[in-house]
Amino acid sequence: MYQTIELKKDDRIATLTLNRPNSMNAMDDVMMKELADAFEELNGDRAIQVLLIKGAGRTFSAGGDIKKMIDPESPMDMGAVMQHITRLAKTLYLLPQITIAAIHGSAAGLGFSLALGCDVLVAEEDSKLAMNFIGIGLVPDGGGHFFLKERIGTTNAKKMIWGGEVIDGKTAKAAGLVDELVPSGHSEEAATQLAHGLLRSPITAMIASKRILHESKRTELEHVLQLESESQVAMRNTTDHLEGIRAFVEKRHPQFTGN
């Protein structure tokens, strides 16, 4: 059914795997659409009470597929892409399941936004996390502004967005960006144990509380997603974005001019 992700359901637990391991699970337009479709499928499945999201291969997700962004033969339609991203972020946040991200390797850019959209983040100590859109002259999308602000507040969110630094799991845990820290190679195991523990809890009440808290933020998230979409389309036309992309491809430091 899906080309770039896998969605498996076992009893009351669903496991969604980002499945482009040869591309470090970078998200192209196909994966973005499929994620949105999968979340909408889960939104209508009340038999599932926990969703675990993980990445195949060496990493969780390297973020948006930059190579696909600059592919002259089949460039991504930014307007359509932002519609997919908006749909996946909003649906993920409002899912009637407890959502767990199991992070290994790296979670960068849109991959980090996806993880932050989950209720619980489990990360390996040596994992690398980055809201690094700024490096190619873009703004966070996938609700990145909203999810960061929810976790660490507006001031710290701005620092992280503007700095674009890569931080390890321990630093992320200390900052409140990660809920559970585990040794290298154990994120999936720990997330699975957590999922089964939730099923032994009064999870229906937990999901009801999630709905109350998240529905109260729905309008704010929708507004942020609209602003992200508008801003991202605009940023794609800037000189700084083009320079950031060229520098990435050429493996050099970008020379930004503020245009």
Image (cartoon, helix red, strand yellow):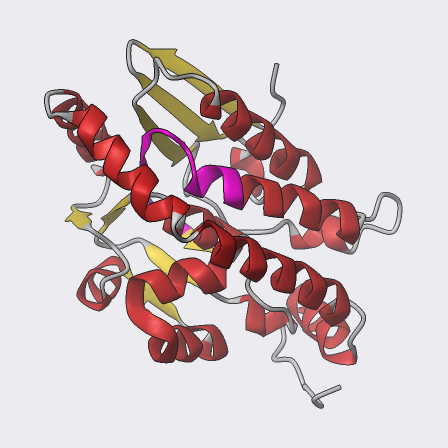
- Taking the magenta stretch, the answer to whether it contains residue 102 is yes
Residue occupying the point 78% across, 76% down: 238
Residue lying at 62% horizontally and 39% vertically, measured from the top left: 32
Q: Nearer the viewer, residue 41 or 111?
A: 41
Residue at figure coordinates x 17%, y 50% from the top left: 181
Q: Position of residue 65 (x, y in %)?
A: 64, 49
In this view, the residue farthest toward the bottom is 257
Residue at the far right in the pictured view: 73
Give the x, y percent position of residue 157: 39, 72
Residue 101 visible to an observer of this rendering: no
Seen in the image, is 100 located left or right of residue 16? left
Q: How many marks?
A: 0
The residue positioned farthest toward the top in the image shown: 11
Residue 111 appears in the figure: yes
Q: How far across and down, in percent of the image, does residue 55 sit?
A: 42, 35
- Quarter of the figure with residue 48: top left
Per the rendered image, the range of residues in magenta is 90-106
Q: Please name whichever residue, 126 or 45, is drawn nearer the observer in this view of the structure.
A: 45
Judge whether 184 appears above or below 169 on screen. above
Q: Residue at x 56, y 36 (%)?
A: 22
